[in-house]
Amino acid sequence: MKSKAIISFLGLAIFCLGSCAQSSQSAIKPSSEDSSSAPISSSEERNPDGVYDFYAINDFHGSILERYNGDYYEPGLSKLGGRLKYLKNLSPDNSFILSSGDSFQGSLESNYYYGMPVVEAMNQIGFSSMTLGNHEFDYGQDKLLALSEAADFPFLAGNIKAWENGAVNYDVNPLPYACSTTVSQGNVKVGIVGCIGSGQTTSITSKYVSDLSFVSPVDIAKDEGKRLREEEDCDIVILSLHDEAKAIRYESDLKDSFDAIFAAHSHDLERYESSGVPILQGSCNGRYISHAQLTIEDGEVSCSLYENIQADESWEEDEQLNELLSIYLDAEEFSSLSEKKLGSIYGYLDRGGIARLGCKAIFEKYRDYDDDGEDDIVLAMQNSQRATLGSGGTTTEFTYSDLYKCTPFMNEITIIKATGSQIKAEARYNYSYSSSESLSLENNEYYEIAVIDYLAYHQNNSKEYDYFPSMEDPTNVLAEFPTYPVDLSAEYIVDTLGGKLVYSDFASTSPGFNSL
């Protein structure tokens, strides 16, 4: 059932995952105790007084290429990485680079190789740590492990516990990732705590985290921060949190545990101060670099400056990063797919329009999925997408890579039976298409629909199917098709629309999109 594009995509990606992991830079990572090769003396002996700069990115989402995404600018990995190198080189012993997660998933250039170009670039840039985000699980735990083994820096996840026998086992961390790391440079010893937001089961395709539970990070992070100060003799302690600032901002005793906090996940631009602790989040896709400047004087840490530095087109590309990325991007099979012209669009499709396009493509592909000559499904559904396509009032040509940037989620299509009440409830929060302009569903009757697996199998933190409770009965899963929505959209644009995409055909008021 897969399109030719996705067969090519997965086949080469699996090959490259193995070969690229073997050829990556050293996979020997810093331990969770000390990332330097030589012991460092106590703070009293080494005199860490001075000024220290911490730079962080969050929710990069594999944004390897420089481009405009709607009305905002993404600098791409060469310019962003070059800028981070430049900033670190201003004071190499006193500067640190962190990631607060969601680094890989989000573009063809990254997903095709399951994130390997990004992790190798992060090695070259000189990251000190990366906190796991929810989208780190989108490739599955095996692919995540391969990325962590290729990294020269530790992946951190202090609050992921085992889900066993229908409950959380707080005594077991089933993943090989520590809660913290320490980095020793020059005269300073820095501790970094990494946690993901609580309840992230709801933000991940359930099949990838059936054995995991994401418990509250607050107390775990605070306790670990204190331990790093008291037992590891860290001069500075940083929290890298894959959650928005409000998850920890209102805690009263933050200064006891941390000197700065870098947040993530909501893609917001955040700049706060709480109890003397700066809290920053730099939007997404490399649009900002979060920067906290800390000063140690007589053993006391204070914040001199905290800001989000906006990316600028004037930033210079880094030639070493260009050479690294070209190995991946110039590969013949990859470039032939990424540069494949799909057609043109008149006007501008926002993320909702992209989702509606995908719903119609899914519906048309699987309306008669058992080939009996009759419509089998009443509706197709998926959630919001990631980027925009086209420009208002003009005609723009686009490639497979451009479309993939808009709809990068590696979801598969599932045909399920669900009650009318379940379908109507989910239609309020997601996007759908039906060939009927006014679809009448009885609440307690069952209907067949085509839906992405993330929605079909969605579970709450107790591992209960909460979007479609009918999934508790496995006989309500009628068919599964290992085809990604982006390929269905590409096929629909080329074969059905003849490569001509018009934004108004996928407005919320267009036929079929307001059926419920």
Image (cartoon, grey):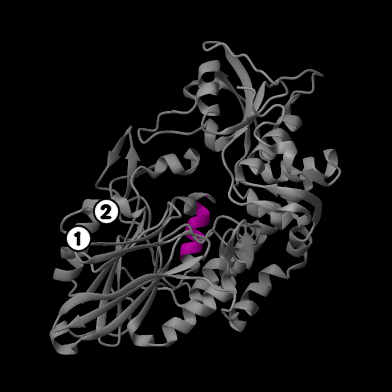
Quarter assignment of residue 318 = bottom right
Q: Characterize the local packing of mark 1: few (<14), some (14-19) or many (20 or more) Cα atoms within 10 angstroms.
A: many
Q: Amino acid at mark 1?
A: Leu
Q: Residue 481 colored magenta?
A: no
Quarter assignment of residue 372 = top right
Considering the whole magenta stretch, tell me its main secondary structure: helix
Q: Which residues are magenta?
A: 140-148
Q: CA distance from mark 1 to mark 2?
A: 8 Å
- Tell me, yes or no, if residue 370 can be seen here: yes
Camera-side residue: 383 or 463? Answer: 383
- Residue on which disc 1 sits: 254
Tally of numbered discs? 2
Of mark 1 and mark 2, the one earlier in the sequence is 2
Relative placement, left or right, of 302 versus 351 is left
Relative placement, left or right, of 1 versus 383 is right
Q: Amino acid at mark 2?
A: Ile
Camera-side residue: 68 or 241? Answer: 68
- Residue on which disc 2 sits: 248
Q: Residue 145 colored magenta?
A: yes
Q: Residue at x 70, y 39 (%)?
A: 357
Q: Can you give x and y, in whole percent of width and height, for residue 502 in the image?
A: 77, 43
The image quadrant where one finds the N terminus is: top right
Q: SS of the residue at dot 2? A: loop
